[in-house]
Image (cartoon, rainbow, N blue to C red):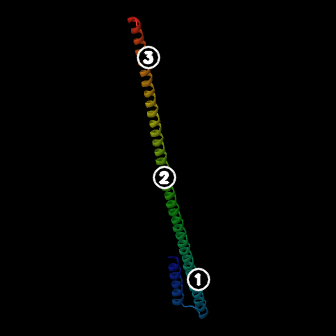
Amino acid sequence: MKIQSLTAAVAAAMLVLGLSACSKEDTEKAKSSMSEAAETVKQKTGEAVDAAGDMADDAADATRDAMDSAGDAMSDAGDAISDTADDAMDAAGDAWDDTKDAVGDMADDAEDAADDAADAAGDAARDAADATEDAAEDAKDKMNEAMGN
């Protein structure tokens, strides 16, 4: 917009000078001024185009950097998820192994307790049989005594 306004102002000034009755020297000065103004407009336009190009390059670089950072973040997140899944699988495997060991220990303890109970029952039965035999012997002896034998 500024460039168009400046160009229009220069052209209007040239037109005014051309239409007015000026000396040759004034006309040459006006031409020179207009050429300088046109050259300044051209230079400023070039600088603006260069600055816009630099800004576009900077924006492209920033976008590229942001995309790289996002890619790195995605990769890191994927690694973290994979590590977490591996840790969870390891923990589940360890828990399963611990459970199997505990069940095996309980089965062994139950078997030992059953064996101990069977041994105790056998001992009690033998003790009862011995006591019954002793009582029968005592009863026989007392009966023989009472009968006079």
In the picture shown, does residue 148 fall above or below 97? above
Q: Which amino acid does label 1 sit on?
A: Gln
Q: What residue type is labelled 3?
A: Asp
To which residue does mark 3 refer? 134
Which corner quadrant holds the C terminus? top left
Q: Which residue, as the protein is rendered here, is positioned at the far bottom?
A: 24
Q: How crowded is mark 2: few (under 14 residues within 10 Å), some or many (20 or more)?
A: few
Helix, strand or loop at label 1? It is helix
Across and down, in percent, residue 75 comes to 51, 63
Q: Residues within 10 Å of mark 3 (few under 14, many from 20)?
A: few
At horizontal 45% and vertical 37% (from top left) the residue drawn is 111
Across and down, in percent, residue 67 comes to 51, 68
Q: Which of pointers 3 and 2 lies earlier in the amino acid sequence? A: 2
Q: Residue 67 carries which label?
A: none
Select label 3 or label 1 by which is in front: 3
Q: CA separation, marks 3 and 1?
A: 134 Å
In the picture shown, does residue 146 fall above or below 21? above
Q: Do the residues labelled 3 and 2 touch (CB within 8 Å)?
A: no
Q: CA separation, marks 2 and 1?
A: 67 Å
Q: Which amino acid does label 2 sit on?
A: Ala
79 and 47: which is toward the camera: 79
At horizontal 45% and vertical 30% (from top left) the residue drawn is 119
At horizontal 55% and vertical 69% (from top left) the residue drawn is 65
Helix, strand or loop at label 2? It is helix
Q: Which of pointers 3 and 1 lies earlier in the amino acid sequence? A: 1
To which residue does mark 1 refer? 43
54 and 95: which is toward the camera: 95
Helix, strand or loop at label 3? It is helix
To which residue does mark 2 refer? 88
In the picture shown, does residue 96 fall above or below 29? above
Q: Residues within 10 Å of mark 1 (few under 14, many from 20)?
A: few
